[in-house]
Image: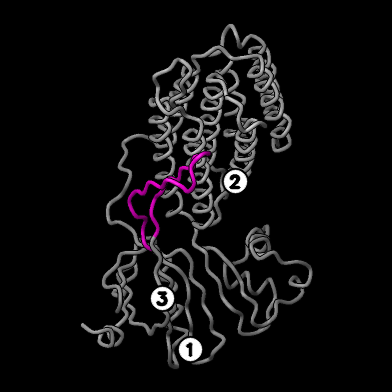
Amino acid sequence: MSWVDKVNSDFTIITGDKKSYKVNWMNATKMKEYFIAEFTFPDLAGSKVDRGQPKGRRYNLEIYFQGENNIEAAQEFEVSADVLLPWTIQHPLYGNILVQPVSLSFDNSQMNVTKITGQVIETISIENPLTTVNPIDQIALQKEALDESFAISVSKTPTSSDVERMKNTNNRLYKTTVPIIQIPEEVQAYFNLFNVANSAINNAAQSPVVAMRLTQSVISAPASFTVNAKTRVASLSSQFEYLRSNIKPKDPNAIIPVSTKQIFQAQGGTIISAMAVAASTPLTNNYVSILDVFDIIEVLINAYNQFLADLDSIQSANGGSPDSFIPDAQSLTDLNLLFNNVVSNLFVIGLSSKQQRSIILDSDTNIVVLTHMLYGLDKYDNNMNALIANNGWGLNELIQIRKNTTVLYFI
């Protein structure tokens, strides 16, 4: 079939409630990404890239309802779009695709036309992962086993520099993390962990595994604080960047001791796993929309790939010498299992969370009328406050919201 025939074919969307919508369309675009791990080497130009399976393709939509009933047709489509089941799109250029919408924007500024733009992601038809246990409980068990695996991977006796570096790391972890804690009891518990870890670090040369276990307790504690999941992940991400900066010697020709590399491996892996746990245990309303979940997933993937690249950059050419460092295979295998489980769980959270919508106002209005239209009014004005916060409005919008303003809301 020629492209002319394809372009003249119908564009049909079958929504989750099995209703079929034949729409006009323009500007067909799609994007395809792959799971990748990028490795760089200090003495080698370029990068080594390992490519995995492709992610779901992303399609940008630009569709139209036209005619005297365009607004009613668009409203009916919006109701159908809120059904959580995936859509089947019969696309003139891309054929039949099974997708989930990420965001939709409705523009009624032209009286005879409703323009709808947004993005959809291709989804597979089977549920993954298939589990028979509570995923949060499984993640907690995997995290516990992983921490032990990383702790016992520290087989070399720490040097005096290692002990000093561990103290500095422990102190920084405590000082920069305390400000995010909102419950006094958690502050006291964290302070106690910090003190016990400091005492163990002083004896790290005699008991490196014990010192590492207690240091891991301080590292992992922020993952369970009663604060926003994104705040916890951001705090741990900052700790990871600090840890990375410490592994790089000031002299590029200096030799990094094996014990230093093992400690970095254990602490870095503990931080990455703590980020994963923090992301997968959000408080109520931490993730406003599916876009928030995808942002967190991207942060986790970038940190995980960076950790693997860092380990790759400090490993020895081979393991034939007692002074060689080869990353611990069991620990990294366990980390990979935990990471994949967490990301899968986040996709489940994302697909069950609210979807972003936006409209362009066709007349002046006010916050009370707009809240009533989009969410409905409630006794304590929670819906009104959420609408104000999501759009970053100030005093001016409390008085009047002008025509042609783009309004974000979540359903």
Q: Nearer the viewer, mark 1 or mark 2?
A: 2
Mark 3 or mark 1, earlier in chain: 3
Mark 1 is surrounded, within 10 Å at the Cα level, by few (under 14), some (14 to 19) or many (20 or more) other residues, namely: some
Q: Residue at x 66, y 18 (%)?
A: 161
Q: Is residue 21 left or right of residue 79?
A: left
Q: Residue at x 67, y 23 (%)?
A: 165
Q: CA distance from mark 3 to mark 1?
A: 14 Å
Q: Nearer the viewer, mark 3 or mark 1?
A: 1
Q: Quadrant of residue 100?
A: bottom left
State the extent of the magenta-drawn residues as a range.
33-58
CB under 8 Å between discs 2 and 3: no
Q: CA distance from mark 2 to mark 3?
A: 33 Å
Furthest residue to the left? Answer: 1
Estimate the x, y position of residue 159 in percent, counting from the top left.
62, 14
Mark 2 is surrounded, within 10 Å at the Cα level, by few (under 14), some (14 to 19) or many (20 or more) other residues, namely: many
From the viewer's side, name the closer residue of 378 and 131.
Answer: 131
Mark 2 or mark 3, earlier in chain: 3
Kindly state the secondary structure of the residue where label 2 is placed: helix
Residue matched to label 2 = 230
Q: Amino acid at mark 2?
A: Lys
Q: Quadrant of residue 54?
A: bottom left
Does the magenta portion include 90? no
Residue matched to label 1 = 113
Q: Amino acid at mark 3?
A: Phe
Residue matched to label 3 = 77
Estimate the x, y position of residue 106 in percent, counting from the top left.
51, 77
Does the magenta portion include 39? yes
